[in-house]
Image (cartoon, helix red, strand yellow):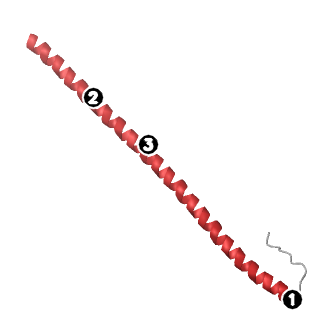
Amino acid sequence: MKLTRQSGHREARVEQRRKEKLAKQRDEKVQEARNLDREIAEFRQTRERQLQEQFMSMRKDIIEDIMKVVNEKVKAAGYDLVLDKTG
């Protein structure tokens, strides 16, 4: 009986260690997934900021080009006032 009881305790300890190992692996995977989510969110924010800056820079350049043409036409025509109705 001692052998059976010891064997049962040993099996219980082995099973407990296996469960602990699986729980640790699960926790590591969950943490890894959370880290990936955070990295993705940071990448998305950085990229959106870069695209917004690029858009604003391109818009500024276009507006400057338009204003050059408008100013040339205004001077050539001798206008005192020009209204912008584009909004």
SS for callout 3: helix
Q: Residues within 10 Å of mark 2 (few under 14, many from 20)?
A: few
The kind of residue on which mark 1 rests is Ala
Is residue 1 among the parts visible in the rendering? no
Left or right of residue 44, residue 61 in this image? right
Which circle marks residue 34 in the picture?
3
Which circle marks residue 77 in the picture?
1
Marks 1 and 2, how far apart at CA = 86 Å
Is residue 28 among the parts visible in the rendering? yes
Residue shown at 59% from the left, 67% from the top: 54
Residue shown at 91% from the left, 80% from the top: 80
SS for callout 1: helix
> How far from the left and from the top, in percent, is residue 46?
53, 56
Label 2 vs 3, first from the N-terminus? 2
The image quarter containing residue 81 is bottom right
Of the pair 16 and 61, the residue shown nearer to us:
61
Find the residue positioned furthest to the bottom.
76
Placement of the C terminus among the 4 image quadrants: bottom right
Q: Residues within 10 Å of mark 3 (few under 14, many from 20)?
A: few
The image quarter containing residue 15 is top left
* Figure label count: 3
In the rendered view, tell whether residue 11 sits above or below residue 51: above
> How far from the left and from the top, in percent, is residue 43?
49, 55
- Residue on which the image places disc 2: 19
Left or right of residue 41, residue 18 in this image? left
